[in-house]
Image (cartoon, helix red, strand yellow):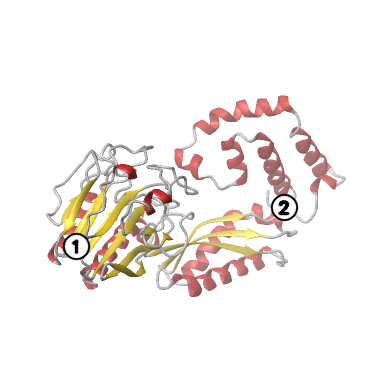
Amino acid sequence: MQSFRFIHTGDIHLDSPLKGLSGQQGAAAERIRTATRTAFETLITQAIEDAVDFVVIAGDLYDGDWRDYQTGLFFVKQMGRLSQANISVFLLHGNHDAESQITRKLTLPANVSVFPTRKAETFRLPHLNVALHGHSFRQRDITDNLVPAYPPPVAGCFNIGVLHTGLGGMPGHANYAPCAIEDLINKGYDYWALAHVHQAAVLHERPHVVFCGNLQGRHIRETGAKGASLVTVEDGQIVEITPLHVDCVRWILLLVPVDQCAAVADAVDQIGRAIEEAVNRDAQGRLLACRIELTGATGLHGELLASADHLLAEARAAALGLGDEVAWIERLIVATTSPETVASREDALGDLQRIIESAGSDAELQTLISTELGDLVRKLPHDIRTDADDAVLKAAIDGNIANLIAHGGAYLSARLATEKV
């Protein structure tokens, strides 16, 4: 067999709207807005420089229907670059870019082969003795196991299966095109190029079953290095799978303990140090998109809650102080606790907290709260309902009235306990 190299990528989500950018201006915000394009363009440059033989895109090239033709034109331009370098591309559509999801189309360069939606099909590269098998999604919600209908392996070839799958229910991902890993192992292929799960992983070797992960992190649930896989094959055997980290923005959750802080100003200093240390440790030349979470039991709990907007502004000032495109602060969450039990206080604040706590066991009051809040929650934008992190808001959205009363009571008591109400 020939020796060759190929890139396995997927979950590119071109022009996906990134979260947390509402009202944000400046070079850092613009860099985040264009991150999916920049990462993909970097990957194409890497493919050309490494002179790979072909590229496999295992689904979710697009995030959904194009807002206009610019998304498609950008992709065609990148495919043209690969065509000039004689690099073939094998494209499979997943749940986000299923045939039913995309209403606009453009003619693709001749070097791009698209797996059909009617049934699984095989594409061959005779000069490399490679056979690629794949089945694109016709609609978003594919609930059938597609693997049994994939063609048998081609004798004498290095066989690659391309599949967009939840693989039986991976955490945090809808279980589209479900299958068992044994289905893949027993198919007889040499390499399974999987996508849909955004965390890169080699699940099995010989045969190799590999999730490439997503190309560019888009929010705080997609932290760490992101990219694609460069696969090297020699004499029909995989000898190396190398991660290609092409992300231009890297997300990180910064847990900042403030239990030793004597004043809010000390917490501000702690935040600044945490941002600078993270940039030096984790950015690796990329823009670091940070969510900051203040932790610990502290007597400043109420004052920190009341100063949340000021703390966020201070955090963003600290990030800008490192350079305009070094760090960007998406959100700051005050997750501290108070070392004292407010309900034990013998004053009006203690009385209020005891009333709030007793409401948690009042079924009639809980029903009333649930009814009153229901209409308000339904009016919230979809993104807020699905991505809520604030404990009080999340409890309201989830309809967990007991938690809402508990968290809301703690928040109210903390605010009333400070001078900054």
Query: Residue 16, position in %: x, y?
Result: 34, 50
As measured in the structure, the alpha-carbon distance from the residue carrying label 2 to the one carrying label 1 is: 74 Å
Crowding around mark 1 (Cα neighbors within 10 Å: few <14, some 14 to 19, many 20+) is some
Q: Position of residue 128 (x, y in %)?
A: 18, 65
Q: Secondary structure at mark 1?
A: loop
* Residue 143 placement (x, y as % from top left): 38, 37
- Asked if the residue at tag 1 contacts the one at tag 2, i.e. Cβ–Cβ closer than 8 Å, the answer is no
**2 or 1: tag closer to the N-terminus:** 1
Tell me: 45 left or right of 366: left
Where residue 74 appears, x then y in whole percent?
Answer: 21, 55
Q: Amino acid at mark 2?
A: Glu
Query: On the rendered structure, is 219 left or right of 295?
Result: left
What residue is disc 2 on? 419
Of the pair 2 and 18, the residue shown nearer to us: 2
Q: Which residue has dot 1 on it?
A: 129
Element type at mark 2 = loop
Q: Residue at x 23, y 38 (%)?
A: 118
Residue 104 located left or right of residue 388: left
Outermost front residue: 155
